[in-house]
Amino acid sequence: MSTTLSIQILPYEYVAPEGFFITGSGGYVFYISRLDYLREGHTPVFNPSTGLIPGSRKSNFQSNTFSNDPSQSVSFQENADYQHEGELVESTFYQLDMHRWINTQIQKNQAFKTTNVPLSEIAEGTKAFEQTVRDFTTKYGDFFTSNVHSDSFQENRLDDWFNEWKDVGTAAMDAQSEEGKQKLTKAVPEGKSILNANLYKHTGIGDYRGAWSGERPPGGGVRSRIFRPINLAGLCWALIARDISDNITYSRCKNYQSTTNPNGCEHEIPSITLDGKTNMEYCSRNCSEVS
Ligand SMILES: [Zn+2]
């Protein structure tokens, strides 16, 4: 079964960073492969946990994880902007709930922002959030920059990650209610709506003209919007736009973790996938295979 969608999200491609660390001064999220890039004489090191060589270009974003249709697959063309060579590895994870998953992480990591508790608890909260961010970058790459081995890399502190994730998570939840949708799409006198401002900042291409409106064109039908995320923040905001415009709802993956399924995943499935499919049960091929 296929459903017409008003939002189209184009594939997100990135260059995998390697060697996450937090700088001693300032607490910035950094990568050893970024340092290597800065030093120029770069030697790729194979990472057994991800199967990736740092700097290998890949798309971790498939519109339908279960599709074998070759037209669905992303072509990996050589691009001079990518500084490092590496073997491409096809991803097995699914990201259509990234904005909502981020909200869950923010709820779990409230201790990171708590100040009126003993220092030891603050340190623990910081450590826990650092681990969350470390795991995230290992799996998905940097949140703010698609290629940390380039001049476009944005330096952000853990604190910046938390604040951005909080905005994304809050918006992801708001996108599920009428009141929240209005809050996100209402233009303010000083400028763009919350949604519009973030789409403008983090996405590009397609027929996107820097403006978002939820209104239907005259004569019915749906105004199509095409977004290409330029970073993972952009992917999240494009997913939020989709939730609002196409009334996407979510349910837990059939392999969701629980007391009886401690090794299950923590992902959700959208009511409609990016290419219009419904009735998905599993978030990924991995989950369908272990169940
Ligand atoms: Zn799953």
Image: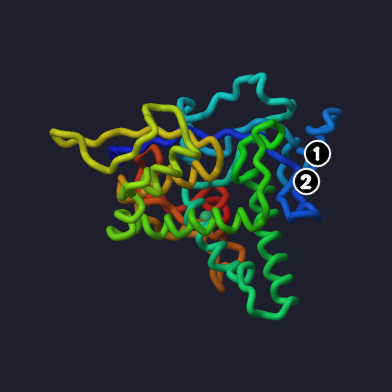
Of residues 138 and 74, the one nearer the viewer is 138
Please name the residue shown 43% across and 55% down the image.
Answer: 172
| Amino acid type assigned to the residue bearing label 2 in the image | Gly
Q: Are marks 1 and 2 in contact (CB under 8 Å)?
A: yes
Mark nearest the camera among 1 and 2 is: 1
- Residue 267 image offset from top left, x and y in percent: 51, 56
Q: In the displayed structure, does residue 29 sit left or right of residue 174?
A: right
Determine the image quadrant of residue 24: bottom right
Q: In the displayed structure, does residue 279 sit left or right of residue 221?
A: right
Please name the residue shown 73% across and 76% down the image.
Answer: 119
Of residues 86 and 228, the one nearer the viewer is 228
| Amino acid type assigned to the residue bearing label 1 in the image | Leu
- Residue that carries the numbered disc 1 in the rendered image: 35
Of residues 205 and 60, the one nearer the viewer is 205
- Residue 155 image offset from top left, x and y in percent: 68, 44
Which element carries disc 1, helix, strand or loop?
helix
CA gap, disc 1 and disc 2: 10 Å
Of residues 79 and 121, the one nearer the viewer is 121
Q: Which mark is residue 19?
A: 2
